[in-house]
């Protein structure tokens, strides 16, 4: 069994409805980067909220990457990489404040993704994509945090294979709808689908200094101009944007409400871009 972004609403239902096996039903599954980060931020939010039993049931699954991500979120500051100038296939970075995105560790993390993804080939595809990652992290602060003094659980991670490079930022914050409603221009939005549509098609932003969301505009242009896939999830909606030759394709889902939001990107040099399973060695044990 392989679980990726599209399965997150079903996983959320298993967490909310523990009868008939609950979350234990996915024990032993292969999972993508996006699922690993979702489970980690959910675990941390449940633990801090006092639901230690459900949080422990997630940790006991032993799924690839999850315990590593849980430990990453436990740290009081972003953990220093053992090899900051390396090119690992899998890496994580905790985001708990604006300051975390101003650290040299964040810049080094983004650069490790570029080195891992281009595998020494100096492809402009990955140089361009790596430049977008800072914007993805910054969007956590703007869209997920209710205020500077009201952060949420958030984490960034990447996974690189021989053919595909994936990057994901996941959080348990307020979501795109509530964020956009802070702006008078978008205050009339009343559901998660319309909020994501405003971000994707109208470049909506809650930033008072910007007329349109430059971060996501750059994200879509940089990734979809290449052989890329972008998945946006917030609340009860998910958008999948892909490059299909000369045309761009958008598929929208209304689904079970999932706390917070996530942005997942996948790029592939030749084949169809799709999420891949994390290796069993990425279990953080």
Image (cartoon, grey):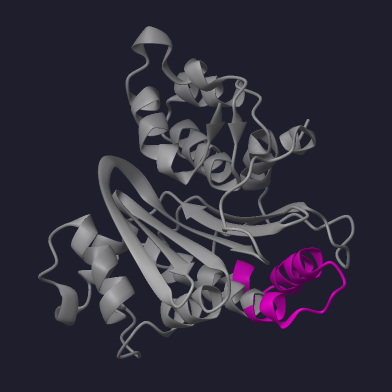
Q: Is residue 194 above or below residue 161?
A: below
- 230 with respect to 128 (left or right): left
Q: Is residue 87 above or below residue 120?
A: above
Mostly what secondary structure, the magenta segment?
A: helix
Residue 226 colored magenta? no
Can you give x and y, in whole percent of width and height, for residue 201 in the image?
28, 76
Can you give x and y, in whole percent of width and height, for residue 249 in the image?
37, 66
Closer-to-camera residue (121/100): 121
Residue sitting at 45 percent across and 65 percent down? 242
Residue 126 colored magenta? yes
Quadrant in which the C terminus appears: top right
- Asked whether the viewer can see residue 131, the reply is yes
Residue sitting at 64 percent across and 29 percent down? 63
Q: Which residues are magenta?
A: 100-128
- 160 with respect to 23 (left or right): right
Can you give x and y, in whole percent of width and height, for residue 177 in the image?
24, 62
- Asked whether the viewer can see residue 145, the reply is no
Can you give x and y, in whole percent of width and height, for residue 44 in the image?
52, 38
| Quarter of the view holding residue 100 | bottom right
């Amino acid at each position: 069994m392989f679980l990726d972004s599209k399965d997150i609403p079903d996983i959320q239902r298993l967490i909310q409805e523990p009868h008939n096996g609950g979350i234990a039903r996915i024990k032993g599954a292969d999972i993508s980067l996006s699922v690993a980060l979702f489970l980690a931020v959910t675990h941390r939010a449940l633990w801090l909220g006092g639901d230690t039993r459900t949080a422990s049931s997630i940790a006991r699954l032993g799924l690839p990457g999850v315990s590593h991500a849980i430990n990453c979120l436990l740290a009081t500051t972003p953990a220093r990489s053992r090899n900051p100038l390396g090119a690992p296939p899998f890496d994580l970075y905790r985001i708990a404040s604006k300051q975390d995105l101003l650290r040299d560790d964040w810049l080094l993390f983004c650069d490790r993704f570029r080195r891992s993804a281009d595998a020494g080939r100096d492809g402009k595809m990955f140089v361009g994509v790596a430049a977008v990652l800072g914007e993805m992290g910054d969007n956590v602060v703007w869209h997920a945090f209710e205020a500077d003094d009201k952060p949420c659980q958030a984490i960034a991670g990447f996974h690189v294979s021989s053919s595909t490079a994936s990057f994901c930022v996941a959080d348990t914050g307020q979501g795109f709808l509530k964020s956009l409603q802070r702006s008078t221009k978008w205050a009339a939005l009343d559901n998660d689908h319309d909020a994501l549509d405003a971000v994707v098609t109208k470049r909506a932003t809650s930033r008072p200094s910007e007329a349109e969301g430059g971060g996501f505009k750059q994200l879509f242009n940089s990734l979809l101009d290449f052989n890329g896939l972008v998945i946006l999830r917030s609340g009860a909606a998910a958008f999948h944007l892909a490059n299909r030759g000369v045309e761009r394709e958008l598929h929208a889902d209304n689904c079970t409400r999932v706390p917070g939001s996530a942005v997942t990107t996948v790029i592939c040099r030749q084949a169809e871009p799709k999420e891949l399973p994390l290796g069993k060695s990425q279990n953080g044990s």
